[in-house]
Image (cartoon, rainbow, N blue to C red):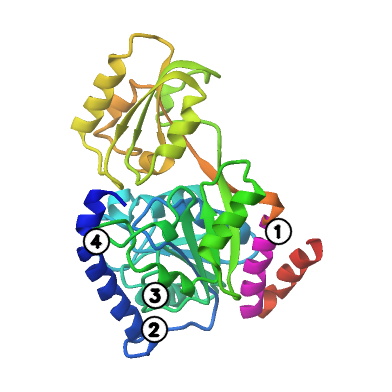
Amino acid sequence: MNLLQLLLLPFALLYGFVALVRNKLFDWKVMPSESFDFPVISVGNLSYGGTGKTPHVEYLIRLLKDKCKIAILSRGYKRKTSGFLMCSDGSTYKDIGDEPLQYCRKYKGIQVAVDEDRRNGIHTLKKHFPDLHAVILDDAFQHRYVKPGLQILTTDFHRLYMEDYPIPSGTLREFRGGAKRADIIIVTKTPRILSPITRRRIHGMIKPRLHQHMFYTYLDYGEMIPLSDKSKEEIRDKYNNILMFTGIANSYPLAEYLKNMCNELDALEFMDHHSYSMKDLERIQNEFDKMFTRNKIIVTTEKDAMRLKHNPEFEPILSKLPIYYIPIEIRFHNGENTIFDDLILKYVGKNQGNLQLSAEAVEGKT
């Protein structure tokens, strides 16, 4: 703990205490928490962002979308609208938020909705789509008004919640003890090669309870995709310069990945969920023009791309720049995805009798 964190610790303890009292009121049933008679899976974290939650939600989407009818429900962080709203072909990130828009654009055949009131969102989804089999709640670990049937907690390998502190001394939204509500704990953004010694060390730090399952995942980067069709050019194995710009909580994994693709990496970092302006794009263009080489490109994240694409105002600049984004997926260590898949499918199958065979089929392969 550095000096600033130490000075802010009294405020962090006060913040954590308020969150603790709130949680106790839910635990003691003083405040209402609603359960549902169909599968509700929550994916969240103890910190206020940057744990790699989004690619884990996408993993669940890919696992379930061809087996049953699912919906994604998010609050739609930093959207300009309020209340319940379904994603449609004409939706923008200002309508529903960048993460829900990403789910909607990438995965056809699923329902994506936003509502800051998750109980109302679930009820509205079920009213509009009575044949839904399961709802996945995006970033709802602290939304205690809903009691999911399965809670998944993600924590960053480089900043485990056991080594963090409540806001403002750290990034936690509540005390570390809140992790006891999780059924599954996933340590994210690990190195591709994770030693047994490191796993034992982390396991010893987290000390999962008897009912909790622990997994370790790492990021796998896909092929670069041009942000604008007009900016397509041949992808190279190595560049002299790459300009990376991001508006996410933690950009270090992408930076480390891109360093292997270039001789020099320059970075422009904006606030998480940053709403880009023409001034921002002009700044990006100016930084790119300063690079005295032809062997150069601009790279951003898929989440940032959602805030830039399909905006006519940005097109004059985007069409002139070689901007690419890189989709990511998560991978489980040691083939443990089969165990994870089985847990998810068993839960969904147990609560939806007609899906029981799917869970049993997976069980037979493990």
Taking 20 as reference, is 197 left or right? right
Q: Give the range drawn in magenta.
A: 337-352
| Residue 364 x/y as whole percent | 81, 66
Q: Which residue, given by chain and number where applicable, does mark 4 sit on?
A: 9
Q: Which residue, given by chain and number where applicable, does mark 2 sit on?
A: 33
By secondary structure, the bulk of the magenta-drawn segment is best described as helix
The dot on residue 104 is none
Query: If you read the primary sequence from the N terminus, does the residue marked by circle 1 or circle 3 appear first?
Result: 3
Q: Which residue, given by chain and number where applicable, does mark 3 sit on?
A: 124
Taking 69 as reference, is 180 left or right? left
Query: If you read the primary sequence from the N terminus, does the residue marked by circle 4 or circle 1 appear first?
Result: 4
Q: Which quadrant of the figure contains the C terminus?
A: bottom right
| Residue 228 x/y as whole percent | 40, 29
Front: mark 1 or 3? 1
Give above or below for 53 relative to 36.
above
* Residue 286 visible, this orientation: yes
- Is residue 343 inside the magenta stretch? yes
Query: If you read the primary sequence from the N terminus, does the residue marked by circle 2 or circle 1 appear first?
Result: 2
Tag 4 near tag 1, CB within 8 Å: no
Give the residue type at disc 1: Thr
Give the residue type at disc 4: Leu
Tag 2 near tag 3, CB within 8 Å: no
